[in-house]
Image: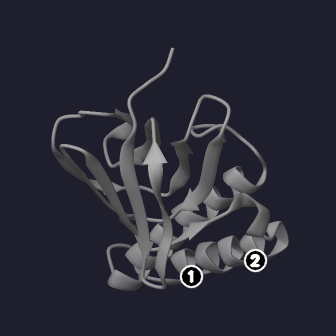
């Protein structure tokens, strides 16, 4: 079944990583997973680290390890502003495991409720999500 297409733009602080027509966007907000199709209701939401999937067709899927950020859905366009968007092929599992270990160490050494503890918890969540993407796991798997 053919779906209508719409424009998706993915921006990071380093610049644009994707700008093309797709039939569906699959990502994760603060309240759960979301799929966006053409003519979706307007939406503004916080994004959680996850695997971002951009469906150019049923068989052509562009994937990214997505950091935290925002999604804005308008009538014919979706804009994702994220801290990071990395192709799974560019992820280094050993580097991600080191980053995860540093975040866990920082979490355990910082006072709970402090800004440093919150930052370490956010980093831990991101590196866990990126490791799942690097390992080819489905979003939501542990």
Question: Which secondary structure lies at badge 1?
Answer: helix
Residue designated by label 1:
106
Q: Mark 1 vs mark 2: which is more N-terminal?
A: 2
Q: How is the image coloured?
A: one colour
Instruction: Specify the quadrant of the image occupied by residue 87.
Output: bottom right
Pick the residue in front: 54 or 125: 54
Instruction: Specify the quadrant of the image occupied by residue 138.
Output: top right
Residue at the spot x=49%, y=58% of the render?
49
Residue designated by label 2:
98
Residue at the spot x=51%, y=14% of the render?
1
Residue at the spot x=42%, y=83% of the render?
13
Question: Which secondary structure lies at badge 2?
Answer: helix
Residue 44 placed where, x, y %?
19, 52
Q: Which mark is residue 94?
A: none
Q: Nearer the viewer, mark 1 or mark 2?
A: 2
Q: Residues within 10 Å of mark 2 (few under 14, many from 20)?
A: few
Pick the residue in front: 53 or 132: 53
Residue 104 placed where, x, y %?
61, 72
Residue 18 visible, this angle: yes
């Amino acid at each position: 079944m053919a779906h209508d297409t719409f424009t998706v733009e993915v921006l990071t602080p380093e610049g644009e990583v994707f700008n093309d027509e797709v039939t569906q966007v699959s990502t994760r907000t603060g309240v759960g997973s979301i799929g966006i199709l053409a003519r979706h209701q307007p939406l503004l939401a916080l994004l959680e680290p996850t695997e971002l999937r951009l469906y150019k067709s049923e068989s052509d899927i562009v994937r990214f390890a997505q950091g935290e950020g925002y999604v804005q859905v308008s009538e014919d366009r979706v804009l994702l502003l994220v801290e990071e968007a990395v192709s799974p092929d560019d992820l280094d599992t050993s580097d991600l495991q080191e980053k995860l270990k540093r975040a866990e160490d920082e979490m355990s050494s910082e006072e709970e409720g402090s800004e440093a503890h919150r930052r370490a918890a956010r980093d831990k969540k991101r590196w866990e999500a990126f490791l799942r993407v690097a390992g080819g796991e489905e979003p939501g798997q542990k």
